[in-house]
Image (cartoon, rainbow, N blue to C red):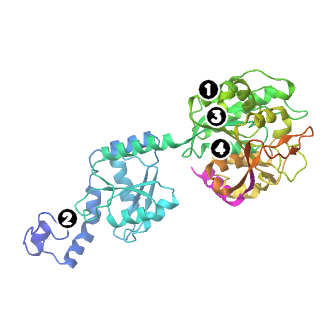
Amino acid sequence: MKHDKELRGTGIINENPEYLRKGMFDWTEKEENSFYNDNIENFAKKLKPIKDAPYYIKKLKEDGNEIYIITGRDNGEYTNPYEITKEWLKKYEITYDKLIFTNSNDKHAKTERCIENHIELMIEDSTRISLDLINSGINVYTMNTRYNQKEQTLNRVSRWKEIYEKISELNKKEESQKINVILDTDIYNECDDQFALSYLLKSQDKFNIEAITIAPYHHDNNISIEEGIDKSYEEVIKICNWLKFDCTHKVFKGSTDYIANDYNETNDAVNKIIEIANKNDKTYILAIGAITNVALAIKKEPKIIDKIEVVWLGGHSFLNKNNKEFNFRQDVQAVKIIFESKVKLTIIPCKNVASNLKTSIYELEHFLKGKSELCDYLCQRFYNDGIHGIQERRIIWDISVIAYMINKDWFETKEISCPNINSDTSYELTKNNHEITIVNYLNVDKIYKDLFKKLGEA
């Protein structure tokens, strides 16, 4: 009103304009722009948050959501948009993980930042930006304002309490759609299991991690199986702590010998596999070591075969004459139990398939070194895993099983009649047995791109 009096003193000519400064007074466009440019910085400092916004944003953060604030203030209208915005957010105690600036004159800029930062849901007030986000596949809640009422197709919200309730409900729905998994791992064996567990933990948008069970392993002139189980257990806890995954009542020690050696004892891992299988409609067991624990669970409670699916890294492709591969040869009897049980089974062979996942310490250091304590540890473990000595290049075998569950489009598979296992561990092909799935090809580039992106994230 003060500025209007300085111009012509006509007063308000429209009580309900679409925009507060446009159409309320009889100002020319030049006069409106002059008023806006002279006062926008002062207005930005004096604006107050929408009612309850700080409270519900904090609750969203406490619920485990990441909060990214994307503003269009990098458009030349502010002397120092970053400092003004940062001070305002601090003043009103608004919680956030990352503050991103774009140019509001570019309607696609916020969309690009959302894609770059893997943002799944945006809260926006601009119609044109909301529509651009939606066209790029990003979910949008559009805050109701007087200036965005023309577009009727938008998913609208009016209060932050409503936003909080909608996101909470969405999270519950997504949680119920996650895949229930158990990771069965001999993680202290070499370096690849650590990568696999980290990859799994960084993919919790996809998985409900029910348990991590410890599989047996043994190398000649090395520690005993019991010692390996204990070291693997400690290794799992360490990685879970680094990635802030609450593993309380989630990690279970498994078999201390092999079925091939007449081991037939129950243990925490076997009991937990049975318990989880019976609880869920469907559970995937991701096995990246000797398959002893899984075989014992099936042997003890055969009914679980209807409620589980096993994805196992083991043996070699049919191009090889035998399966004298570590996971396979450790407990051939366990493999036979799995095959004969008729459980739904996918096998990722080692040679000729997973063996393509070779990378180098140079690639790892380029993408991961310095990103986190975990990433530095993985680089160090890759270079010297304590078993095979210092190596500049290795195959990170076990990530194949995690990647298969993340995106099966990265793999080529074939349904075959379950083979028999000969006395020399070679496969005998059959025609009339139950079917299993064999992976014949994996896309190395896509797997490593996803792995490095996830592990490198803060």
Q: Is residue 424 left or right of residue 180?
A: right
Query: Label for residue 306?
Result: 3
Residue drawn at the location 36% of the way across and 53% of the way down: 87
Q: Amino acid at mark 3?
A: Asp
* Mark drawn on residue 275: 1
- Mark positioned earlier in the residue sequence (3 or 4): 4
Closer to the observer: label 3 or label 2? 3
- Frontmost residue, 35 versus 64: 64
Mark closer to the observer (3, 4): 3
Within-10-Å neighbours for mark 4: few <14, some 14–19, many 20+: many
Question: Which corner quadrant holds the N terminus?
Answer: bottom left
Q: Classify residue 80 as left or right of residue 395.
A: left
Q: Which residue is mark 2?
A: 20
Q: Is residue 322 above or below residue 233?
A: below
1 or 4: tag closer to the N-terminus: 4
Spatial distance from mark 3 to mark 1, Cα to Cα? 14 Å
Q: Which residue is mark 4?
A: 198
Inter-mark Cα distance, 2 to 4: 51 Å
Residue range highlighted in magenta: 439-458
CA distance separating discs 3 and 4: 29 Å
Q: Is residue 224 visible?
A: no
Residue with the most extreme left position: 10
What is the distance, in whole Å, between disc 3 and disc 2 at their CAs? 64 Å
Q: Residue at x 35, y 42 (%)?
A: 165
